[in-house]
Amino acid sequence: MDLLISMLGMVGVRLPVLIALAIAVVWVVDTPRGSIRSVALWALGVLALTTLASLVLNVVPMWLVQQGNYENLQLMSTLLGVGHFALNLFEALALVLLVWAMTRALRGRAVQPLPPLPPR
């Protein structure tokens, strides 16, 4: 029961990020098809997966403690640290891809010159 409450608390903390990612996916899906859209969707997908994987990695130590398995906790701590580092690398890559897609989309918009003013 304590594990379930802790898990619900962790989901609650990550819920705003997951909602924001879902809204972003809806906005990106509504754009014209192209390489920029594909990169943006991949980046949002990777961000969602890293958020969910981080949630799972945070549950593992609590589950081990709940089970009374203290022998492997030291090894699991090291492995979880490596796992979180890898997730942070993927998250950083996804952010770079998302910013690249936004930059390309914004640069692709041509700025229309203003029409000349009528003579007085």
Image (tube, grey):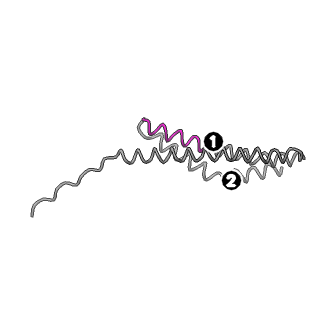
Where does the magenta region start and end? 34-49
Amino acid type of the residue tagged 1 in the rendering: Leu
Left or right of residue 104, residue 64 in this image: right
Residue found 19% across the figure and 54% down from its top: 115
Q: Sequence order check: which comes first, mark 1 or mark 2?
A: 2
- Residue found at x 49% / y 39%: 39
What's the amino acid at mark 2? Gly
Q: Disc 1 or disc 2, which is closer to the eye?
A: 1
Real-space CA distance between mark 1 and mark 2, rounded to the nearest whole angstrom: 16 Å
Q: Residue at x 42, y 35 (%)?
A: 34
Circle 2 packing at 10 Å, graded few (<14), some (14-19), many (20+), is: few
Asked if residue 109 is among those painted magenta in the image, a careful observer would answer: no
Q: Which residue is mark 1?
A: 49
Please state the horizontal and vertical placement of residue 97, each as a whole percent of the image.
51, 43
Q: Is residue 1 left or right of residue 86?
A: right
Q: Position of residue 33 (x, y in %)?
A: 42, 35
Crowd rating for badge 1 (residues with CA inside 10 Å; few <14, some 14–19, many 20+): some
> What kind of element bears circle 1?
helix
Between 21 and 108, the one lying in front of the other is 108
Q: Which residue is mark 2?
A: 12
Task: Indicate the secondary structure of the residue bearing disc 2.
Answer: helix
Q: Quadrant of residue 35?
A: top left
Q: Quadrant of the C terminus?
A: bottom left
Is 48 magenta? The answer is: yes
